[in-house]
Image (cartoon, rainbow, N blue to C red):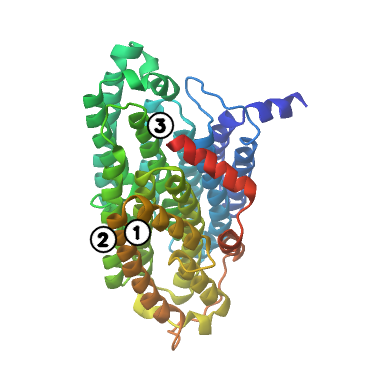
Amino acid sequence: MSFLSGLLVDPAPLLVAVPAASAVLLALMPSYRVGALVNVAACGLTFALALLLFGAPRIAGPFLIVDDLNIVFVVLNTFVAFTTAWFSAGYIAHELETGRLTPLNLRFYHAMYQVLLGAMTLALLSNNLGVMWVAIEVATLTTVLMVGLYRTEAAIEAAWKYFMLGSVGIALALFGTILVYMVAQPVVGEGADGMIWSVLMKHAHNFDPALLNVAFVFLLLGYGTKVGLAPLHAWLPDAHSEGPTPISAVLSGLLLNVALFAVLRFKSLLAAHPGTLAPGPLMMAMGLGSLLLAGFMLYRRRDIKRLFAYSSIEHMGIIAFAFGLGGPLANFAGLLHMTMHSLTKSAIFFAVGHACQVKGTQELAQIRGLTTSHPLLGWSLVAGVVAIAGLPPAGVFMSEFLVVTSAFAARPWLALILVLGLLIAFGALMMKLSAIAFGEPSPGTDPVKASFVPMGVHLALVFAAGLYLPPELVAWFRHVAAVLG
């Protein structure tokens, strides 16, 4: 009982410790089948611990913090990590059967999956600017290694491209972090207090506004690279197309959100000082730029994973625009859209992984007629694309509707650009979907070997959210939206 009571009081350290211990265990485990099961079990345990955060006290220690904002991200991240690990168990086993991976590759893959989950969770729970920066850097380096897992020329090139652009971004974020410490030092003194979120927020109104403005610009550019916002997005399509499909799901559904979380933390710090520049216009500009760029780029994609990589850039642009717009309704819409995008896009990548395996290719021209050759897979992909395109009754429709209505209320001219970008992307996705799902099937009739359950669970949640949102969820998101300001 004492163990359980201690667990209920403070699950935060365990959320980092479980993935760390699991990574060591999986690195030493020779059997890839047992490793896959342990990976799923470890992710399931981490998700269960994340749910305990709802009943845990809101703490702000020297290293970890639990507040209403990061609980949203931690619960969403651990859930998608769990379902992706479930999907990955069958998907990666098929890669071993076809000779694309070796048992040693799989041991490395499972260990790195837990390192990635632990690093992302630490970044979300960290109360220290430096620890958060290190955690995001570890997550970046881990995904670089996993993008190059197939060791093909294209995969290694994509990994290096991700490494180089990610390094530039993280260097800019580091410089911004140092500037924040320099701003805080005259007010809170030397030492660790100048790096602690909870301390910084209490004294933010006393900071030098000019230097804080410069810091935010560097931080937005640095962490914006990780979010995949234009013009800092160039790494994202390559990383999605060349890495294992479960990693594409993790990148779109999780890692982009972690970088966005860092931006929101610093946005709150800036907003706490009345003399600083408004961070919203910068975020709205980058968000609309990402939406328009991705919408046009969707038309020319020939690789199915690149297609949905640009869709991720589009939706991160919408989310950045919503949070930049600010206010209770726009922040609520941003939180809801982030949640719906993570669930929907990971489900789409599950379907894409199945399709690439049964057709033996990622080329869009060779993936056709899925509803005829593989009806369950084909119609599941149709449901996913319909949802991500923003058609009712999916939850994405509800969140996009809220973003658009809040934009028309506050910035009508920007709302017109937003709607234009949404229509451009919608047309591209529908055009591509008609060829993928319908018509004469392309060669490739192998049965799907990975589990459909994770994809089904995600799609069920997305369409259920479009019809009904539990009052408890609405109240929670409203509270977090008010905290964001």
Q: Amino acid at mark 3?
A: Met
Mark 2 touching mark 3, by CB under 8 A? no
Q: State which quadrant residue 239 falls in.
A: bottom left
Quadrant of the rendering where the N terminus is positioned? top right
Q: Amino acid at mark 1?
A: Glu
Point out which mark residue 314 bears.
Answer: 1
Q: How many marks?
A: 3
The residue indicated by pointer 3 is 132
What is the x, y in percent for residue 274? 31, 27
Quadrant of the rendering where the C terminus is positioned? top left
Decide if residue 9 is on the left or right side of residue 411: right
Label 2: few (<14), some (14–19) or many (≥20) C-alpha neighbours in 10 Å: many
**Relative height, residue 165 to residue 192 (above, below):** below
One can see residue 67 in this view: yes
What is the x, y in percent for residue 7? 67, 29
State the residue at coordinates (35%, 22%). 204
What is the x, y in percent for residue 392? 51, 68
The residue indicated by pointer 2 is 293
Decide if residue 141 is on the left or right side of residue 113: left
Q: Nearer the viewer, residue 93 or 438?
A: 438
* Distance Cα–Cα, label 2 vs label 1: 8 Å
Label 3: few (<14), some (14–19) or many (≥20) C-alpha neighbours in 10 Å: many
Q: In front of the other: label 2 or label 3? A: 2
Residue extending farthest right: 1
What is the x, y in percent for residue 409? 38, 53
Decide if residue 164 is on the left or right side of residue 480: left
**Relative height, residue 378 to residue 25 (above, below):** below
Mark 2 touching mark 1, by CB under 8 A? no
Q: In front of the other: label 3 or label 1? A: 1
Q: Earlier in the sequence, mark 2 or mark 1?
A: 2
One can see residue 156 in this view: no
